[in-house]
Image (spheres, helix red, strand yellow):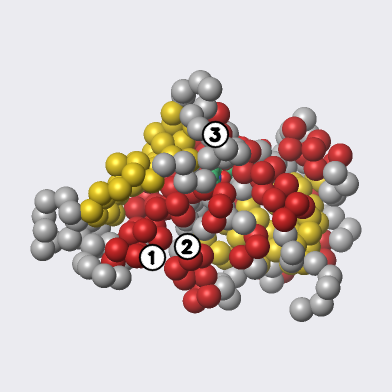
């Protein structure tokens, strides 16, 4: 690979999209910010992107497609909502763009980078499951490698302040997609996910938004129906596994 960075666009200028923009700009060896796309011209995320010199559009996916340098954008991260992602993915695929889905739309193969990124890296749509899934499924999978995991359950407690309208619009998709990934990628025989929006003020143990806390997590193999493995995963940061440095 040459020294030129790959241009990435982010659709969704809310909590997750803005956080990701800063991560790309501060930390990525391989990516640069090609565009920040929203639908709300008054969005704080769009204003911050513009101040940093990132090309912006408040015209949604059509605004992205209309950018004069659109053909230079090779990766698009979608941080909107599951419903919007269905439309965005359909419009982007004809251009051969790599689409990284941060919503729980679950179009592409379920990807938990520490488990199966290499196996799925050629997929046109990378389905990043959910924040709760990324924080917990590696542990389910690790246990599944040494014993039969009969059932795995996660309870993701997310600081209410970190959950924007996009996250709140996706609660059903969050639980369905996380449960499916616990089985598909975690290799548990059955999985369940529950999400709690924790309204505590100040937000509990917040490190950098968004953060999540997953707790009351357990797996129990059929050979030992009583709980044999119990752990608390506190303050797992959803973003820690979403960093674009995996590319
Ligand atoms: N908050 C979390 O902890 C977390 C973690 C990981 C993933 N997610 C997922 O990320 C997504 C965004 O969550 P959020 O908390 O940042 O929500 P948010 O509401 O803060 O951000 C969503 C942004 O997308 C914009 N938007 C909505 N529809 C759009 C469209 N069609 N085109 C362009 N922009 C559009 C909104 O104006 C808003 O700025 C959700 O799907 C959520 O499930 C959230």
Residue at screen point 51% across, 65% down: 113
Examine the rendering and report whether any part of residue 218 can be seen.
yes
Which of the two residues, 4 or 105, is positioned nearer the viewer here?
A: 4
Q: On the image, numbered disc 1 is attached to which residue? A: 185
Q: Position of residue 241 (x, y in %)?
A: 54, 56
In which quadrant will I find the C terminus?
Answer: bottom right
- Quick check: 10 left or right of 66? left
Q: Image quadrant of residue 7?
A: bottom right
Q: CA distance from mark 3 to mark 1?
A: 28 Å
Residue at left offset 11%, top offset 58%: 224
Q: Residues within 10 Å of mark 3 (few under 14, many from 20)?
A: some
Residue 76 position in % (x across, y down): 68, 59
The answer to whether 146 is drawn above or below residue 79 in the figure is below
Residue of label 2 = 112
> Tag 2's secondary structure?
loop
Residue at 77% across, 43% down: 59
Q: Residue lying furthest bottom in this view?
A: 1
Horizontal side of residue 217 vs 195, given as left or right: left
Using the image, tell me which numbered label, if any, was put on residue 206.
3
Label whose residue precedes the other's in the sequence (3 or 2): 2
User: In this rendering, is residue 101 above or below 115?
Assistant: above
**Residue 95: quarter of image:** bottom right
Please say if the residues under marks 1 and 2 sit with CB atoms less than 8 Å apart: yes
Q: Residues within 10 Å of mark 1 (few under 14, many from 20)?
A: many
* Point 76% across, 78% down: residue: 1
Query: In the rendered view, would you say 124 is above or below 175?
Result: below
């Amino acid at each position: 690979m040459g020294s030129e960075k790959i241009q990435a666009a982010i659709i969704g200028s809310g909590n997750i999209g803005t956080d990701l923009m800063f991560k790309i700009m501060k930390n990525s060896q391989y990516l640069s910010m090609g565009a920040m796309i929203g639908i709300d011209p008054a969005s704080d995320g769009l204003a911050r992107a513009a101040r940093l010199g990132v090309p912006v559009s408040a015209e949604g996916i059509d605004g992205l497609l209309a950018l004069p340098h659109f053909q230079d954008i090779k990766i698009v991260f979608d941080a909107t909502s599951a419903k919007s992602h269905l439309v965005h993915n359909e419009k982007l695929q004809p251009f051969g763009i790599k689409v990284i889905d941060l919503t729980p739309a679950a179009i592409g193969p379920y990807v938990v980078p520490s488990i199966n990124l290499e196996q799925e890296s050629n997929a046109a749509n990378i389905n990043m499951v959910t924040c709760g899934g990324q924080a917990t499924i590696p542990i389910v999978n690790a246990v599944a490698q040494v014993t039969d995991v009969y059932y795995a359950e996660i309870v993701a407690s997310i600081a209410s302040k970190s959950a924007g309208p996009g996250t709140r619009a996706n609660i059903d998709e969050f639980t369905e997609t996380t449960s499916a990934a616990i089985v598909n990628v975690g290799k548990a025989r059955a999985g369940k996910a529950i999400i709690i929006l924790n309204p505590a003020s100040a937000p509990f143990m917040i490190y950098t938004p968004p953060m999540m806390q997953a707790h009351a997590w357990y797996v129990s193999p059929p050979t030992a129906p009583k709980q044999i493995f119990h752990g608390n995963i506190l303050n797992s940061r959803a973003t820690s596994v979403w960093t674009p440095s995996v590319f």
